[in-house]
Image (spheres, grey):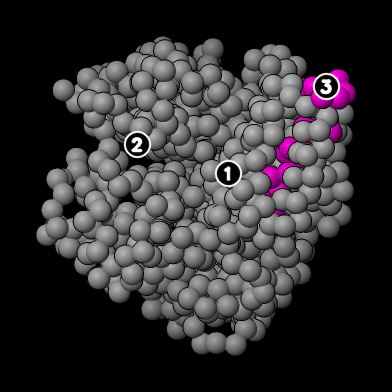
Amino acid sequence: MTAIFVPRDSAARSVGADQVAAAVAAHAARSGTAVEIVRNGSRGLMWLEPLVEVDTTEGRVAYGPVTPDDVVGLFEAGFLHGGAHPLGHGPTDRIPWLADQDRLTFARVGIVDPLSTEDYVAHGGLTALRRAVELTGEQICDEVADSGLRGRGGAGFPTGTKWRTVLTAPGSEKFAVCNADEGDSGTFADRMLMEGDPYMLIEGMIVAGIAVGARHGLIYIRSEYPDAVATLRVAIRAAYGAGWLGPHVLGTDHAFDLEIRVGAGAYVCGEETAMLESLEGKRGVVRSKPPLPALAGLFGKPTLINNPLSLASVLVVLARGAEFYREFGVGRSRGTQVFQLAGNVARGGIVETAFGMTVGQMVQEFGGGTSTGRPVRAVQVGGPLGAYLPPAQFDLPLDYEAFAEAGAMIGHGGIVVFDDTVDMAAQARFAMEFCAAESCGKCTPCRVGAVRGVEVIDRIVAGREVATNIALLQDLCEVMTDGSLCAMGGLTPMPVRSVLRHFPEDLDASEGARS
Amino acid sequence: MASENSPRHIPWSPEAARETIESHAELRGPLLPVLHALQDTFGYVDQEAVPLVAKALNLSRADVHGVLTFYSDLRTTPPGKVHVQVCRGEACQAVGGHALAAHATRSVGVAFGGTTAAGTVTLDEVFCLGNCALGPSVTVDGHLHGRVSAAALDRLVGDAVGDQR
């Protein structure tokens, strides 16, 4: 019986994977061919979705993008034995786009059946947890610190330091929270990990709980990810059934309970303290720090908060050793980072690599330039609060410090490509509009400033007192940067300033004063 | 939103509301799960639910009202029979999202956040569906669609409306 993989990842489904799976099943039944259809995660080669893989005697062979109408032709071309076909790409692992990556955290995504506990363990799952239950919390935290791992949510804070802080925090009740409110446009890595390898996140949470002494875990997932929510709910039930969760983790005296909480459409709840407020049943208003959530977080208790990719990275560290992880990377950025190529890009998807690539390499070599074939005019890295980079900045290495020095931000690794039809004034206006829509409302510079920002940009674009309004916009950016409690208001000026600096012609600023 | 694909909503009733509230009230920090459950059940959170929730959770009505009106997912009026969300995030903008959004409001005939006069379609904007390499993206009754053209959007909405008849 041949196994045929058709992804269940929501991106693949968005372009017809379910219909393809049904067509394969129907044709197999009609022709009396025995096949087993496995709904795997996505390999992350989005331009090839739905990507259908066949498990041949020589390994997995890929075909894509497949439509239901292609199915008969694929069978007739002998795709069950890896036969040649215009949609064929040969052995999946040898596709250069994949072969050139270092998939440490995404190792199982697209390979396994996401909900199969057997598949998970057969592909290295539980290696880290089995080690963790034999170690003290301090030993686990030390290893994480040794690895140099920095948080993958966006702030890049040293993960080991954070874990140690929660471990040593006074208090008998502690929480481990996963921030899966991946709200940045251009990012989907957390979503794909949750849909494609949910047990990895569950194992990561259990390890975190053991490391810092937390017996309760919560995963806060944005409501815009219903498939991730559903997948994790099923996986958690299975994990309880398998004894990975509950009062005796893997039969030991460690106890850990895990639940899902769903967001309700607020981007600001990706900010960790707003997320805590949301978990407590309140409006997602940002808290001042100190106190750090690590010391006084959820319900006032010491709380560990990590991004899904960070937790997945910890498992790699524990399974393969801190030194192994440290060997990847450049400068102070260790291990791998998961970049997401998105927007107007020919070859979008997941690129997991050691740091050190430049923006240009990523966009051209992996991305293949724009999907329209027109020139790349701008690339926004780091989500809505990230700078728009012009081609002149494409030699920037994808490194936290290099980006910060250049007035830009890596964030959660989203890379959105725009071609030369982009109106950068509209993008600057959107930055302010988005902030106004999503502001929690606490700080006047953010709440009111964003509204005024939209108005000022509208006046500039209309040609009214341009020089005066440009100066006003600069001043507003300064006030929002300095006077906002969190990155919502504090970093909204980043994309706006990048437009002022690198694309002034779209704001007509280079024309000088017309007032 | 998490159960758009589940059975249709039931008409508002305080008894059903009380049951829904009670089944989630034991959670720690239960308000958001309670409000989600009410919306999953009725399609929206009726104003009459506010004092019921407040009493069950020992919160003030102002607290409940504050949370209910803070989060964009939560609605206080019944939705249309068909729910359409159009992504206005940057990655979708980069592949024509601005134009698709404008087309959606014209074609459906309401501004974002609105419901058509006959109560057929609710049109919402959303900032990112996590489908950023296959945009422009929309959801229709909870189903995610990528690479959506204006014509495809009209067809998807038309089919969904047709299914309702």
Q: Name the side, left or right, on which B95 lies relative to A471.
A: left
Q: Nearer the viewer, residue A181 or B121?
A: B121
Residue B124's quadrant in the figure? top left
Task: Give, as a single range, the part of the protein colored magenta.
Answer: A487-515
Q: State whether residue A143 is above or below residue B126.
A: below
Tell me the amino acid under the disc marked 3: Arg
Name the residue at 38% across, 13% down.
Answer: A69
Name the residue at 30% across, 41% down.
Answer: B4
For the residue labelled by badge 2, is the local secondary structure a helix, a strand or a loop? Answer: loop
The residue to which callout 3 is attached is: A514
Same chain assignment for discs 3 and 2: no
Residue B154's tag is: none
Give the position of the N terminus of chain A as an image quadrant.
Answer: top left
| Image mark 1: chain | A
Circle 2 residues within 10 Å: few <14, some 14–19, many ≥20 = some
Q: Name the side, left or right, on which A105 lies relative to B152.
A: right
The residue to which callout 2 is attached is: B142
Tell me the amino acid under the disc marked 1: Ala
Q: Is residue B38 magenta?
A: no
